[in-house]
Image: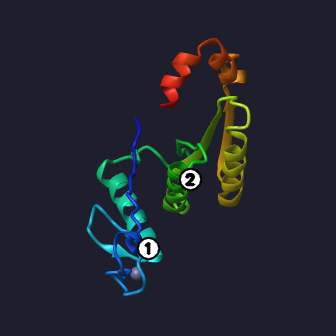
Amino acid sequence: MIYEFEAKPTNARNRNAHSMDCDKCGRESVMHAAYSGLHLCEEHFLASVDKRVRRRIREDDLVPDDATPEDPQTWVIGLSGGKDSVVLTDVLHRTFEQDPRIELVALTIHEGIEGYRDESVAACEELVAELGIRHETVTYEEEFDVRMDDVVEKDPENMAACAS
Ligand SMILES: [Zn+2]
């Protein structure tokens, strides 16, 4: 089951000749929220994302009744180090920081593409250390005894289709 929380950032200053003000507080907006039509400053944008995530969790009943602080449910977050997964990890951390019924585990997959993942894996490690959440890193090599570089060498056409 994959839940995707999506926001579509647009830069108000690039879209318009003059910048727009936050609809909630009047400070300079950094964001035009496509879902609400509101212009929001950084603080109010983050608050609105948190609120939407919490509402979604509640409405979709994602925290099961039998999850307790003593016997929490584990949620695995796919953390690639890209901005979407970093934001999701951050938001879920804030959401469940004070709610021990859910235990978060960040999972990073290292495909074994030389130089490609190393930097983002380091970014992932930095983030989880900062947030204090459990982190598992798996590599294709360890799990499946195959490196993506080898796959590319053996089947370059298939890999090109993947990347496009
Ligand atoms: Zn504001």
- Residue drawn at x 59%, y 17% as measured from the top left: 156
- Crowding around mark 1 (Cα neighbors within 10 Å: few <14, some 14 to 19, many 20+) is many
Q: Is residue 41 above or below residue 89?
A: below
Query: Which percent across, then down, holds residue 136?
Result: 67, 39
Horizontal placement of 51 versus 43: left or right?
A: left
Horizontal placement of 151 versus 102: left or right?
A: right
Residue type for callout 2: Val
In this view of the protein, which residue sits in the foreground, 28 or 110?
A: 28
- Asked where in the image residue 22 lies, by quadrant, the reply is bottom left
Q: Is residue 148 above or below residue 39?
A: above
Query: Which percent across, then down, holds residue 145?
Result: 70, 16
Q: Which residue is mark 1?
A: 30
- Asked where in the image residue 80 lies, by quadrant, the reply is top right
Residue type for callout 1: Val
Quadrant into which the N terminus falls: top left
Query: Disc 2, ligand 1: is the CB inside 8 Å?
Result: no
Horizontal placement of 118 versus 11: left or right?
A: right
- Residue drawn at x 53%, y 24% as measured from the top left: 160
